[in-house]
Amino acid sequence: MKINAIELRRIAMPLRAPFRTSFGVETARDIVLVRVVTPEGEGWGECVAMSEPLYSSEYVDAALDVLKRFLIPALPEKVDARAAKRAMKPFKGHRMAKAALETAVLDAQLRISGESFGSFLGASRERVPCGVSVGIMDSIPELLDAVGGFVEEGYVRIKLKIEPGWDLAPVRAVRERFGDDLLLQVDANAAYTLADARQLAKLDDFDLLLIEQPLADDDLVQHAALSRQLKTPVCLDESIESVEHAAAAITLGAASIINIKPGRVGGYLEAKAIHDLCVAHGVPVWCGGMLETGLGRAANVALAALPGFVLPGDTSASRRYFATDITTPFELADGHLDVPTGPGLGIDPIQDILDSVTTSSEWIKF
Ligand code: OSB
Ligand code: MG
């Protein structure tokens, strides 16, 4: 496949409600979309980097810079997703930027060959069960209202964001209100240290599916130590940026479950490799999210349909995030989202809506 041009389009998507985590509050998504144009068709990739380097070291301006300066110029004349991954490999880090470019190339390639993301990745299901990630709130009643709304909508699993001072009380309140059958888990986004092990062990009473990323990103050994002190399974998000990290975490006993986010690990090829490794080791995985638009969501839903994704993902419906998505919205049916079946992502941006949220656009010609 030969590329004629690449568009780097920046969009601003207001969130329906502020999303608060232990690292900050998000009120709008600032997103780079990569559009690869070839003589036979186009492909899209969504960069999940956030505006500020608070979740990881990546941020939107840096992603745009590394794409323009290094990643796009490194692409070979004849390219497919695998060749793109290989060409970008010498450059350290910047996995979210790499993922966006690799995904756009893969989408173009699959649209041309007529194969869907799901089929290419090895999806074994037509629809996936969906969870929802619920931010930190100002009060317990406010949280219970939010969770009640999501349960009503049909979400099959609730994830509560936690931080020191907002952990036991919200978990207890949600358990008391919604009962023991509710699938419930928590995500600390690295807000604790090993010195908090006693406090975190108090969560053992609430039969949680898992605790996600309790400690710092680079603390695999300490996660292993914490795992030995908790009954609740430890799941890693931020710590896992590659198949090598996943292997190390499994070997060390730092995680018994892994959250796979394609952006965080550098793309869908790496995400699939981590899935395969985890299946081989009997480690359950689930698909995380980064508040994606319909474009990123389409690929995530396809990935979440692979056989090793045995836990519901943070693949919520479009309306959980945005009043208006840039694609036909993903809608929950019986707690599930359908895996797109059309070529590539199987979904297209709606031009008028896309233009109305675009804040800048730049073309790189080949
Ligand atoms: O840690 O999983 C996380 C959103 C942004 C950054 C990090 C995380 C999240 C979420 C929301 O939890 C997942 C989603 O609904 O897309
Ligand atoms: Mg997380």
Image (cartoon, helix red, strand yellow):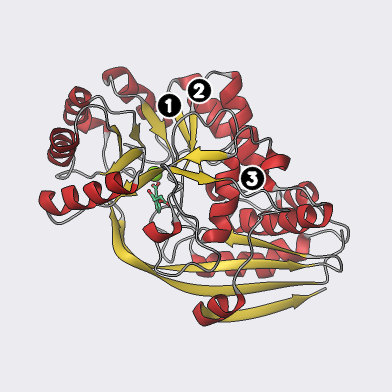
Residue 283: mark in rendering: 2
User: Where's residue 23, x and y in %?
Assistant: 31, 54
Relative to 122, is 55 above or below?
below
User: Where's residue 340, x and y in %?
Assistant: 62, 50
User: Where's residue 29, x and y in %?
Assistant: 43, 67
Residue at position x 64%, y 55% from top?
98
| Neighbourhood count class around disc 2 (C-alpha, 10 Å): few under 14, some 14–19, many 20 upward | some
Q: Is residue 28 left or right of residue 177?
A: right
Q: Quadrant of residue 323?
A: bottom left
**What is the three-letter code of the residue carrying label 2?**
Val
Mark 3 — residue?
A: 268
Q: Is residue 181 left or right of residue 169?
A: right
> Is the CB of mark 3 within 8 Å of ligand 1?
no
Cα gap from disc 2 to disc 3, whole angstroms:
19 Å
**What is the three-letter code of the residue carrying label 3?**
Tyr
User: Where's residue 69, x and y in %?
Assistant: 68, 69
* C-beta proximity under 8 Å, tags 2 and 1: yes
Q: Is tag 3's residue or tag 1's residue first in the polypeptide sequence?
A: 1
Secondary structure beneath dot 1 equals loop
Mark 1 — residue?
A: 255
Secondary structure beneath dot 2 equals loop
Q: Nearer the viewer, residue 4 or 312?
A: 312
